[in-house]
Structure formats: C-alpha cells, structure tokens
Image (cartoon, helix red, strand yellow):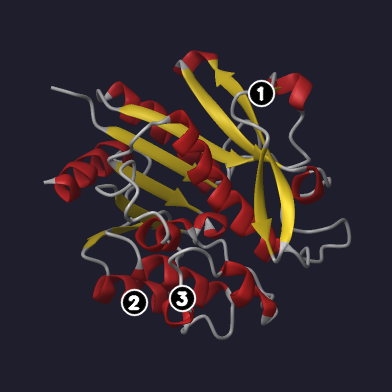
C-alpha cells in the first residue's frame, strides 16, 4: 500500500527559530508522522534571523529561479534546504532577498510589524505550492501552521483545484494564539487575488486582520486543529461551526497520534 503524503507548511520550526509551541510542533510533528509510515515534506520561510552557516542551509538550484508576481511586481523565488539529521528529514525554505533578508521575522527592531507582511504571506504560500509542483509530489494532506500559511487553503481550493497534483488534497489548518495587532491595508485584497480567486472569495476579509484571515483559512479547509489552548474563543466557535472536521487541543504527549488519526479520518 502506497504511503500517504503529508505536506507541512509551517510558520515556525525549531531549531531554526526560538522554541514556541508552534515551532516545537513544526519540528516534531513531521518526524512523528514520518515514523508512523507516512511520507512528509516540510516548508517554512527563510527568515533573515536564521543562521544559514550554522544550520547548513544551501540553495536548491533546480527548484529556484521562478518569479512570482505580487502587486504587478516580479519577485524571485529562491529555495533552500537543510537536513535535521536525527529525524532523517529535510526542511525546505522559501526565500527572497526583498522579503526575507531582513533581521526579523514579523517585526522590525523597533517592534513594529513590517508593512509588507501581507506580501510576505502571499509569497510564502504561493512559493511553497509552486515548489511542490516542481517536485511533482502530490500531497494527500496539506497541513498549515501559523497565519503566514493562512492563504494556502484558499489557493489550493480555488487556484489549484484543477491541478492533478492538488485536486484530491485535503487541507488542514492549525489555529494558534499567534495574533497580530495590525491590520493590512486595503491594497492587500488586490494583491491576494490570483488565478481562480475572485473578489467574492475574500469578501469577508474586511478588515484584513488576524481574525478575518484566520476565518478565511477555516472557510477553505477540510479540517481545523487547535494548536494550543489559548486560541480566541471567537475563532474556536467559528471553526466548530464551519469546519467539516474539528480537533480540540491535544497535549504534547498525545498530539502526534491524535493528528495522525485525524489525517486518516479526513482521508476516508
């Protein structure tokens, strides 16, 4: 029997970023799922604070070189990879000089959110999907973690729904307490529009804040998981109402087995 393929698109992974509940899950969930006889691929942004030499990142030339158009401007997609030896697992990094070279993840040194976080979110999501296309790897499950991956469900269900690689893929979105206080400007809506994505698909993204971006991800997902126990009650209620499948928060001792079972349930 062919192994099921699980694609992880994750905002944070330790040891590349400081440990949080999300980055811990980003590191150990793929390993645990791989050990449960599933095939995995893992993607995250190549934030500028990641030490490439220490973590032995190197560019994958055959996957790099594509341009993504965002807001009528070409942006070069660079793919890097590193190995987590003890897990026998590779991590692919979505990189771009303009978006990810800066020495910060979401905020500048003054603690202000980067004004182009909306574009960085779009670039990360579309970049991960396009790289999977280049790999010619058809995932059964696409599991997204963190709001920077929140547009992936929309693009999979609208822009790539007729692509043979993604036509049968199920999308899961994990909710965390990674709330951000700013609101993307109204130009974000125009930038998000892409092949197959229409104005009506993002009509509820007013204002373009954390809650509404999370709801957009939920609306386009086949399942929702509570990644930690401090998620907004409003989003929990929304997910329980809208998501075809819903999984409550699981502790560190139980989440890998619970997620694996959840994947199987969604695929049946």
Mark 1: which secondary structure?
loop
Secondary structure of the residue carrying tag 2 is helix
Q: Residue 8 in the image: state x and y as whole percent.
A: 43, 40
- Per the image, the residue denoted by label 2 is 238
Q: Position of residue 268 (x, y in %)?
A: 11, 46
Q: Label 2: few (<14), some or many (≥20) within 10 Å?
A: some
Whether residue 37 is visible: yes
Q: Is residue 45 left or right of residue 158?
A: right
Residue 254 in percent (x, y) is at 29, 40
Q: Earlier in the sequence, mark 3 or mark 1?
A: 1
Relative to 224, 84 lies left or right? right
Q: Which mark is residue 248?
A: none
Using the numbered discs, state the Cα–Cα distance from disc 2 to disc 1 in whole angstroms.
42 Å
Q: Label 1: which residue?
A: 61
* Quarter assignment of residue 97: top right
Q: CA–CA distance between discs 3 and 1?
A: 33 Å
User: What residue is pinned by disc 3?
Assistant: 198
In this view, 199 is above or below 111: below
**What residue do we see at 67% from left, 74% from top?**
181
């Amino acid at each position: 029997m062919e192994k099921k393929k699980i694609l992880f698109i994750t905002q944070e992974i330790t040891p590349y970023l400081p440990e949080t509940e999300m980055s811990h899950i980003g590191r150990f969930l793929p390993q645990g799922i791989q050990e449960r006889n599933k095939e995995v691929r893992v993607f995250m942004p190549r934030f500028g604070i990641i030490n490439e030499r220490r973590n032995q990142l190197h560019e994958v030339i055959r996957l790099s070189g594509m341009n993504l158009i965002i807001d009528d401007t070409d942006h070069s997609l660079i793919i890097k990879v590193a190995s987590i030896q003890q897990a026998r697992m590779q991590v692919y990094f979505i990189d771009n000089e303009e978006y990810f070279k800066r020495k910060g993840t979401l905020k500048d040194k003054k603690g202000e959110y980067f004004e182009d976080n909306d574009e960085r979110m779009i670039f990360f999501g579309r970049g991960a999907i396009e790289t999977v296309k280049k790999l010619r790897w058809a995932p059964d499950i696409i599991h997204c973690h963190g709001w920077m991956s929140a547009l992936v469900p929309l693009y999979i269900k609208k822009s790539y729904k007729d692509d043979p690689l993604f036509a049968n893929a199920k999308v899961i979105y994990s909710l965390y307490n990674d709330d951000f206080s700013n609101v993307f400007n109204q130009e974000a809506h125009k930038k998000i529009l892409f092949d197959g994505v229409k104005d009506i698909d993002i009509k509820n993204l007013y204002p373009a804040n954390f809650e509404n971006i999370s709801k957009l991800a939920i609306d386009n997902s086949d399942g929702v998981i509570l990644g930690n126990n401090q998620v907004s009650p409003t989003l929990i209620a929304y997910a329980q109402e809208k998501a075809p499948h819903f999984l409550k928060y699981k502790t560190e001792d139980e989440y890998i087995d619970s997620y694996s079972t959840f994947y199987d349930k969604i695929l049946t």
